[in-house]
Amino acid sequence: MTRAAAITGLVAIVVGVLAGLLATPQPPGWLDPYLPVAVLAAVDAAVGGLRAALERVFSDRVFVVSFLSNVVLAVALVALGDALGVGGALSTAVLVVFGIRIFTNAGTIRRLVLKS
C-alpha cells in the first residue's frame, strides 16, 4: 500500500467519524437487534484486512467479499434467530464468534508489528 493510499484512507475514516458525530443519525427501531452484529462483523473484516496487509497478502476483492459476506451472514443469523424465537441466543453466538476472530487477528497483528 502506498503512503498516499494510507493517508487517503485515514482521512476518509476521520471525515466519516466526524460526520457521524455531527449528524447524530437515528436508525429505525427495527434495526436495533441487527446493528451490533453488523458493526462487529464489519470490524472483523477490517481487522482481517489489516492483518492481510501486514502479511503482504491483501486483496481488495477478498476484502470486499469478506466485508459484505460477514455483515450479511451475521444479520441473517440474527434474523433467523428472531424468526425461531431464539434471537438473543444467536445474537450472542455471533458476537462471541466475531469477538474471538477479532482478538485472534489482533494478536497476530501485534506479533507482526513487534517482529518488524
Image (cartoon, helix red, strand yellow):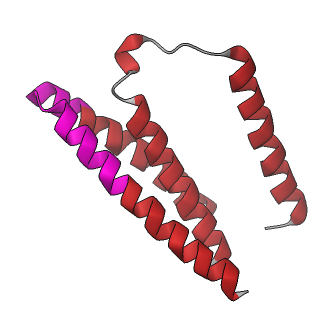
User: 64 or 111: nearer the eye?
Assistant: 111
The quarter of the picture where residue 31 lies is top left
User: 56 or 59: nearer the eye?
Assistant: 56
- Residue at 26 percent across and 43 percent down: it is 92
Where in the figure is residue 41, as x and y percent of width and height? Answer: 44, 47
89 in magenta: yes
For residue 37, side relative to residue 47 (left or right): left
Magenta stretch bounds: 79-98
The quarter of the picture where residue 24 lies is top right
**Quarter of the C terminus within the rendering:** bottom right
Is residue 1 visible in this depiction of the protein?
Answer: yes
Where in the figure is residue 47, as x and y percent of width and height? Answer: 56, 59
For residue 112, side relative to residue 73 (left or right): right
- Residue at 38 percent across and 40 percent down: it is 72
For residue 43, side relative to residue 19 (left or right): left
Question: What kind of secondary structure does the magenta stretch mostly adopt?
Answer: helix
Is residue 68 visible in this depiction of the protein?
Answer: no
**Quarter of the N terminus within the rendering:** bottom right
User: 58 or 54: nearer the eye?
Assistant: 54
